[in-house]
RNA sequence: GGCGGUGUAGCCAAGUGGUAAGGCAGAGGUCUGCAAAACCUUAAUCAUCGGUUCAAAUCCGAUCACCGCCUCCA
């Protein structure tokens, strides 16, 4: 399996530290609002990756944090006149609701920054002791230049970073720090009403980057296999995480860094973000869009590629899902027949498709090629279904294969056989009318049922029906 | 200014040296009493210019356009 590693900027053969096991950490949301579909994309991308790793037999330990204290949290809580903790609880609940709807597998554990303060303080103490951090007033800063590899993840040159940074950092902050590129590990309390914890440096709270270093090393060990997040986290967040962690442990922090592409929107295809006010929350979108369609749309683009969010894109995803639903339902209907035949060609195609699917996904999770394999196989199975005699065993295997594959994309298609005497009676009536070539009655019954959301399909094997949404 | 990404048919998109996968939409057709479902047929020379090569979407150079990061952001 090959994975694109941001650290080396190329695809590398994936080798977890312990054969058969993968530990991964994915940067989670700051819980001060509903997540938008850009946030969802990241969650979906890494869930899809996780599911594929599990499909390939890896046991995955998956940790994703909640940032439940920082400037945004504090500001929003003030605005709403609620406590930071209440704000966090509310949006963690919303996050769970949204991601559950999108069929995201729950993380092995979701640590919260505010519940890790003791470990954060110990971590910072070590950095100070090693000379990688220094105290100014009630703040603690990381001495970036002492970590000579600083910039290795983002390919940034420290001197040029300084030029850029100097234009944006406030003068006060600038003065406190030894160097413009140093960043806060601990921020002293500014006003008495601000949430704060006791520390050796006075009351305060952790900086943003430190929490991920602490939680990652605490729950997964000093060196982890995969660390994921959005492309915008590459610098400075992940660069800083890397510096802090390796400065403390002296060991490699992450073997494979993965960064997902953005969701863009509008004619200019700009990044979806709160500051541009061009975001759509999952909470709102799911009021009108089938969560499964949104999930499939987002996971059917390779994780590193940008997704330009459009309604047409959603429609296309919906059309593909409908095709899969149709074939799975049609097979289920026909498997009740007793007209078994063995089709060696179909058997071979299944084996071949499985190989190709794995080859596609093993190549840095190339979902487009994987879907292409699924389409091709679906075509052959549909052709097979035109026959009077069908291969029960291989059709059964196909259904199982599709179920497994679709689940990697977070999609579960249910094809429950529906039984309804009232509907069946009407269908029988209609068929009687059809035998008598009474098309008027026949069509009238079909229209009646359609109005109730029931679709009829006349096949050589008889009339079958299903609900529009099913 | 520095770093990185993108540009392939109406749309989504694969493809890193040998004469353009797949999907959606559209059009035509088969099947059907008509539908539905399904199947068949059907479209691009790959942003532009130049170069290397027997051969380039694919390598090199230049240009144009767009996006992102360098400041909170998935």
Image (cartoon, helix red, strand yellow):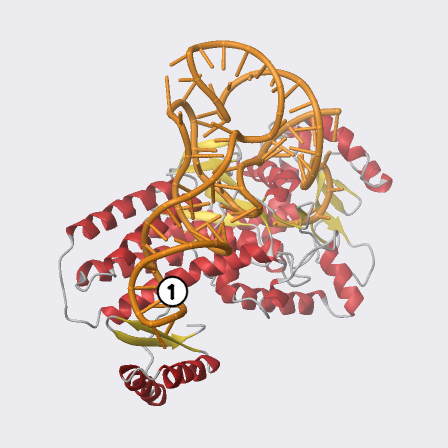
Residue located at (82% from left, 54% from top): A190
Residue located at (34% from left, 52% from top): A55
Residue A414: in sight, yes or no? yes
Q: Mark 1: which secondary structure? A: helix
What is the quadrant of residue A129 in the picture? top right
Q: Judge by depth and name the residue closer to the eye, A182 or A438.
A: A438
Q: Is residue A48 above or below residue A257?
A: below
Q: Judge by depth and name the residue closer to the eye, A97 or A227.
A: A97
Residue located at (39% from left, 60% from top): A323
Q: Which residue is mark 1?
A: A325
The N terminus of chain A - image quarter: top left
**Labels in figure, total:** 1
Q: Callout 1: few (<14), some (14-19), or many (20+) C-alpha neighbours within 10 Å?
A: some
Residue located at (50% from left, 49% from top): A25
The percent coordinates of residue A146 (x first, y second) are 66, 29
What is the quadrant of residue B16 in the picture? top left
């Amino acid at each position: 399996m090959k994975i694109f590693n941001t650290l080396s900027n190329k695809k590398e053969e994936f080798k977890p530290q312990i054969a058969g096991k993968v530990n991964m950490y994915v940067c989670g949301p700051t819980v001060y609002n509903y997540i938008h579909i850009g946030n969802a994309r990241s969650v979906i991308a890494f869930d899809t990756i996780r599911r594929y790793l599990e499909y390939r037999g890896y046991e995955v330990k998956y940790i994703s944090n909640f940032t439940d204290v920082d400037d945004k949290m504090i500001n929003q809580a003030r605005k709403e006149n609620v406590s930071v903790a209440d704000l966090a609880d509310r949006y963690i609940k919303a996050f769970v609701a949204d991601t559950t709807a999108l069929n995201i597998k729950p993380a092995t554990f979701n640590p919260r920054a505010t519940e890790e303060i003791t470990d954060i303080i110990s971590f910072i103490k070590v950095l100070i002791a090693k000379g990688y951090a220094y105290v100014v007033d009630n703040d603690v800063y990381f001495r970036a230049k002492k970590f000579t590899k600083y910039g290795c993840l983002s390919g940034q040159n420290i001197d040029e970073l300084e030029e850029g940074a100097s234009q944006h950092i406030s003068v006060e902050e600038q003065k406190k720090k030894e160097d413009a590129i140093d960043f806060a590990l601990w921020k002293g309390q500014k006003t008495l009403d601000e949430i704060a914890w006791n520390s050796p440096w006075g009351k305060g709270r952790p900086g943003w980057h430190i929490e991920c270093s602490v939680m990652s090393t605490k729950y997964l060990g000093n060196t982890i296999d995969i660390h994921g997040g959005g492309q915008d986290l590459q610098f400075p967040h992940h660069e800083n995480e890397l510096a802090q962690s390796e400065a403390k442990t002296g060991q490699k922090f992450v073997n494979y860094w993965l960064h997902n592409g953005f969701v863009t929107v509008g004619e200019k295809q700009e990044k979806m973000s709160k500051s541009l006010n061009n975001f759509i929350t999952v909470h709102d979108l799911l009021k009108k869009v089938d969560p499964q369609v949104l999930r499939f749309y987002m996971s059917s683009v390779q994780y590193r590629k940008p997704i330009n969010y459009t309604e047409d894109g959603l429609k296309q995803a919906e059309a593909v899902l409908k095709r899969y639903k149709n074939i799975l339902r049609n097979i289920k209907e026909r498997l009740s027949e007793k007209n078994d035949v063995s089709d060696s060609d179909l058997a071979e195609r299944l084996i071949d498709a499985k190989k190709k699917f794995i080859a596609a996904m093993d190549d840095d999770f190339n979902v487009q090629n994987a879907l292409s394999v699924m389409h091709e196989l679906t075509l052959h199975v549909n052709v097979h279904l035109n026959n009077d005699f069908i291969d029960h065993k291989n059709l059964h295997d196909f259904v199982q294969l599709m179920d497994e594959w679709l689940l990697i994309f977070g999609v579960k298609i249910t094809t429950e056989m529906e039984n309804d005497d009232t509907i069946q009676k009407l269908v029988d009536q209609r068929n009687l009318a059809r035998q008598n070539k009474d098309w008027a009655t026949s069509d009238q019954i079909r229209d009646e049922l359609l109005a109730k959301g029931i679709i009829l399909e006349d096949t050589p094997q008889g009339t079958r029906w299903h609900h529009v949404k099913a």
